[in-house]
Structures are given as structure tokens and as C-alpha cells.
Image (cartoon, helix red, strand yellow):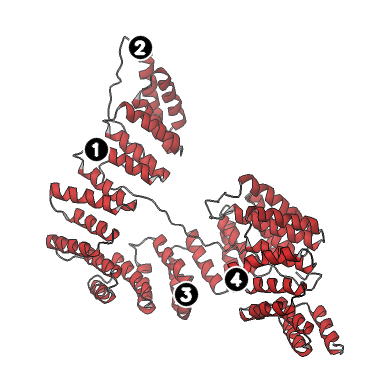
Amino acid sequence: MKGQTGMKKQIRYNYFIMVVLAVAGIIILDTGCSRNIVPVKENKQIKTTQETESAEKIQNFNYLFTEALKQKIFGSYKNAMKYFLECEKIKADDAVEYQISGILAISGQGKVAVKYGEMALQKDPGNIWYYYQLASEFQMLGEGDSLVSVYERIVKEFPKRVKDKITLGDLYLNNKQPEKALKVYLEIEGKYGKSLEVEKKIIRAYRENGKYEKALNEIGKASDIVGENKELLLMKADILQNMENSEEAEKIYEVLIGQYNIDPEVNMAVYEWYMRRKKYDKALKRLEYIINSDQISQNRKLDYMFKLITDKELNAYEREVGKLAMEVYKKEKDDLRTQLLLVEYYNRNDENEKAMDMLRRMILKYPGFKIGWQQILYISEKMQMPDTVVYYAEKGMKIFKNDPLFYVYICSAYIGKEENNKVIQYAGDGLKMALQKGVNYVEKETGIDYKTIIIQLYGYLGEGYKNLQQYRKSDQAFEEGLKIDPENTYLLNNYSYYLSLRKDKLKKALEMSAITIKKEPNNSTFLDTYGWVLFNMGRVREARKYIRKALDNGGDKSPDILEHYGDILYKTGDKNGAVRYWKLAIEKKGEKKVLEKKIETATGEKIL
């Protein structure tokens, strides 16, 4: 947008959605527990006493309990829950509470499920299935400490269950408690003798605890049991890496590649090793094996590729990276994450039309795929296509109602189109939506935090009012945003710059701008703003210093900064220097009429 002053500057957040669809969690394997979320309870006779309950109540309870189990078996959880709750009214029974807990867990009500699970366990602390169900519920909730606590109780209540002890050790290890894990594993080994399974766990515990020599010693013991196999070699190489013994580690990796050239586990370990050592030729060769392997999941391949295409050090390997991106795309063309990889690859190479074409097809087929909409808006904004941004933002608003991010993009477009009333309208509406959820809200699907959205919308609101010369409302919008984040560089920079344009509250503007250059001392835009505030305060020599620094830090590509430096030179009497920088500003698509007028004034010659 070309502003009336001939100088327009703003910093905006870029919403470049990096999609990482990774699932983190603890997987409990071979613990002896059921693999169902809610294991079926063993037959338990309902204890009743004639002294406390009538025969009619007992009969009613038994009928309801049986009917509830039938409904549960047929998948009618709502009806099953109704019957179980009726049972609970007749008698608070652990079997009922166990079943209620399981249904609540299935329906995603983990907190309440835990409550009922604990109630059942208090009544019958000797029932192993109650512990397992409670453990599964804490696992679903992602409460690692509580999960560990359940297994500590299991081990205490059932000391002979070796698999549960192993699980406890594994949980300690996953919970970053290697010393506790080691104690459990050594106790098992001391009681039941050496086994390869436990030896490997001891090795891992020593490694996580930084006791590398002891870990290598355990690898030697494990090798005595089974010989030097692939898994032990991989562990040894990994430990040698951590000991910074790169030469020995590389020798082992070369041996592994020689013996297990197409093994997926070996190729992944060696690929990661070569990447860390920046041996990209060898790394990319291993990655080709990984991508062509049917034993490695598409998500793992995509994890590698997303990281690869964003690594600037690999610019020299553009051809190889492009080939690998196409190969992994061909594996699962209909997979959304795979398609996003190709979009990201096109983005990286500024092949925006190809990225847009793929995104259009994605949102047409999957209109509810929000990340696709966000990507198409981002690219449209990057390509400076405000009408396209408006088109997709409006369509997205109809699908994703009450989502303020679409309002951020449409405000950006209308700023570019100089339709300030619409900017104010959409910024206000977006703020109402975002503030309802609060500044601390983070969207699970994309990871976008509402604090960022709110700050951006306050910035657009301030800019819209500024462009309409409604300065009081403009200042108020910036002030509201700064109440949320007093050191937000985006708001501080724009607010201080706009104050400098109208030569108002210059002391306040200088204080705000000073915060930005303290945070980012080499940011050309922030340096320019600080210099321009100084210039408008009459401190021309100081202003020249900061705007010169802005030019040296990439500002020579900005018409605004070039123009500012020309203005300063003219003020100091260097007319020839001023004209030179104003001409450079015209070349960088600065406001031609304004700049030509300045050149005419300086030279006394009319420009034709």
C-alpha cells in the first residue's frame, strides 16, 4: 500500500504453517495386561448380605448389571452407562465403578474415568485389572507421573510379576529417571539372572544417565550371551558418538552398512549419523534406501524429508532433495501430509503456482483440512495477491466459523487494497472471537496461539485507524495490544513509527523503538524506525548513524530506508548523496512521484 506520506513501513507476523504430525507417548508392551483400553473383568460374584439388602434389590441389581454388560458388548455405551449408573444407586460396587470408568475412558472423559477407577481400586486393591485400567487412563491423559505411580503400586502389591517390574523400569526411563530405572533392572537381573532383554535395558539406563563406560561394559556382557549382533552394534555406535569418539563410531556404522545394507533400522541410524557429521552425499544415499523401504512408515519418511527440505545447508543438493521429495510423494499420493511435503518443497523453491495448484485440489477434496486453507492464504499473501487472499479467507470463514486467523489474513489483504474501513471491521470482529477464548489459548491442530492472533489484529486495527487519520483510536488500539505484551516488537515498531510520521509523542516513540533494537540490534527495520524518530526529534547526526546501520544490515533493499537516508543526507547538505539514494529508492519501487519531487527540489531541474 502506498501511504499518503510517501513512506510506508510495517512488520507483520508470517503464518508459515510447519506441519509436523508426530504422536508422542509411552507405549506399554508385553506387560501382561490386556491390550484393550478397558480389559474385561474376570467373573466376580456380587457380594450381598440379606441383612443389608432386600432380595428384590439384589435381583434388580443383578438384572441391571447383566443388561448393562449386554449393551456394552453391542457397543451401545450410552445405554450401558445408564444401567450401570442405576446399579450404582442401588449399591456402590467396585465392579460397577470399574465398568463406568471404562466407558468414560472410551468416551474421552479421562478425568472422571480416573475418579471411578480409583473408587473401584479402593474397594478391591487386589484386582490387577483395576490397576491396568487406571494405568491406561493415565496413559491416555498423558499424565506420566501418575502412570508411574500406578505401576509402583502394582509392583508393591504383586512383587512376583516380573513383566510389570520391567514396565516400571521402562516408565522410569521414559520419564527421565534413569537411576530409578537402573535400580529396577539390576534388581531383576540379580534375582532372575542375565538375559539379553534386561541387559539392553541396563545399557540404555547407563547411557541415559551419562555413564558411557559402564554402558559399553554391559554391551560386552550382552555380547557374551548372544555374540555381537546388529542391535548391540547400533547401541555401541550411539554411545561412542556421545563420548565424541567419532572415528570408532564411524567404523561400526561402516561395518553395519556392509553387513545390513538394506536393513531399515541400520539405514535410519546411519543416515542420522551422516547428517550430524554433515556428510551429505552419504546421508542422501542412505535416505534413498529409507524412502524405498516398505518396512519404514510413511510418517517416518516424511519426518526426515520435512527436516531435509528446510535445511539451508543442503541448498547445493537441490536436485537430489527434489528427486527424493518426488519419490516419497509417489509412495502415498493421496496422503495429506505427503501432499503438504510437496507444497513445502514448492514453497522452498518459490514455485508458488505449483504449491497453490496442489493446495486448491487438497481443500476441494478435503474442505475441512484447515492447514491446507492456512497454507493457501499464506502463499497468496506472499505472492501479493490480496484479491485471492480475500476470496479464500471469506470461503474459509464459512467453513471454520469463529476462527479469528482468517480475519488476520483478510485484514492483511484489505490493508494492501487500502480499504481501511473493512480492515477496522474485520479486525474488530476477529478480536471479539479471539478474546472470548483468551490470550493463553493455543489451537491444538496447528499450534497457533491466540496471543499472536490478538496482537496482530490490534496492529491491523491501529493501522486502519491511522490510515483514516483517526489517531486517537489508532493509538488506543496499539495501547490495548501492548497491555497484553508490553515488549511486542511488532506493535512497538509500528506504533513508534506512526507517531514519528506525525511528529507526535516523540519521546514515547523513541523509548518504544529502543526496546526493539535492544531485542534485535541488527534488524534493519527496527534500526530505521529508531533513526527516523531521532531525525524527527532534530537529532540528525544520531539518526544518520542508525539508518546507515540499517542499510548495512539488509536495508539497502528497502525503498523506505533508502529514502530516509537520502532525506538525512539532504538535511546535512549533501545534495548529491541525497539524490543518489532517492534514485535508488525509485529503483526499489519507492513512491516515484514523491521521490521525483524531492530530486527536483535538490537539483532545481524538472524530471521529465
Residue drawn at (26%, 69%) of the image: 240
Separation of residues labelled 4 and 1 (CA atoms):
61 Å
SS at mark 3? helix
Q: Quadrant of residue 308?
A: bottom left
Pinpoint residue 37: horizontal percent, then vertical percent. Answer: 36, 40
Q: State which tag comes first along the sequence, 3 or 1.
A: 1
Relative image position of residue 349 (x, y in whole percent): 55, 74
Q: Which of marks 1 and 2 is in front?
A: 1
Q: Along the polypeptide, which appears first: circle 3 or circle 2?
A: 2
Residue behind mark 1: 156
Any part of residue 416 in sight: no
* Marks 4 and 2, the one that precedes in the sequence: 2
What residue sits right under mark 3 in the picture? 322
Tell me if mark 1 has few (under 14), some (14-19) or many (20+) residues whose alpha carbon lies within 10 angstroms of its own: few
Determine whether label 3 and label 2 are within 8 Å by CB: no
Q: Residue at x 40, y 64 (%)?
A: 301
Residue type indicated by callout 1: Lys
Check disc 1 and report its element: helix, strand or loop. Answer: helix
**Quadrant (top left, top right, bottom left, bottom right) of the N terminus:** bottom right
Rendered location of residue 269, percent (x, y): 31, 67
Labels 3, 2: front one: 2
**From what the image shows, is residue 119 above or below residue 6?**
above
Label 4 sits on residue: 352
Which one is nearer the viewer's eye here, 88 or 276?
276
Q: Which element carries disc 4, helix, strand or loop?
A: helix
Q: Mark 2 points at which residue?
A: 53
The Cα atoms of the two marked residues, 1 and 2, are separated by 35 Å
Residue mark closest to the camera, 4 vs 1:
1
Mark sitting earlier along the chain (3/4)? 3
Which amino acid type is shown beneath numbered disc 3?
Answer: Gly
Q: Count residues near mark 4 (Cα–Cα under 10 Å), then give few for <14, some for 14-19, many for 20+.
A: many
Circles 4 and 2, Cβ within 8 Å, touching? The answer is no
